[in-house]
Amino acid sequence: MEIILHKNFKKKFKKLSPKIKRNYYERVEMFLKEPHNPILSNHSVDFIYPGWRSINITGDYRVLFEPQ
């Protein structure tokens, strides 16, 4: 699986707290091993981004992705 990060993501990610960054890396690693782990709450966001899905990083942060 290839992960491509949007330039806006990279810019905003630098400003996040170390705790949120750590959560991000842990969740991405979990996603790569088991994409439908219940902790990730992998769900569709078709109503806003047709064909895209979302996983939870924290209560306030999500990662959107387009399945290939």
Image (spheres, rainbow, N blue to C red):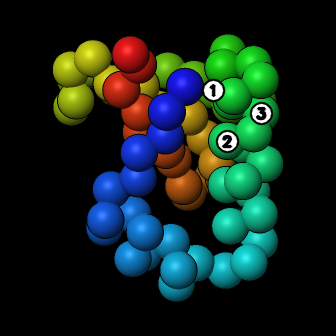
Q: Nearer the viewer, residue 63 or 25?
A: 25
Q: Mark 3 falls on what kind of element? A: helix
Disc ID at residue 28:
2
The residue where tag 3 is placed is: 30
Amino acid tagged 2: Val
The circle on residue 19 is none
Mark 2 vs mark 1, CA separation in Å: 13 Å
Location of residue 8 by image quarter: bottom left
Badge 2 vs badge 1, beta-carbon distance below 8 Å: no
Left or right of 15? Residue 7 is left
How far across and down, in percent of the image, does residue 57 sit?
64, 48
Whichever of callouts 3 and 1 sits on the residue coming sooner in the sequence is 3
Q: Secondary structure at mark 2?
A: helix
Q: Residue furthest front?
A: 2
Circle 1 SS class: loop
Residue 4, position as x, y percentages in the image = 41, 45
Vertical relation: 67 (above or below) 40: above
Q: Are marks 2 and 3 in contact (CB under 8 Å)?
A: yes
Q: Residue at x 75, y 39 (%)?
A: 29
Mark 1: give few (<14), some (14-19) or many (20+) Cα within 10 Å.
some
The residue pinned by badge 1 equals 41
Residue 11 appears in the figure: yes
Inspect this view and state whether residue 38 appears: no
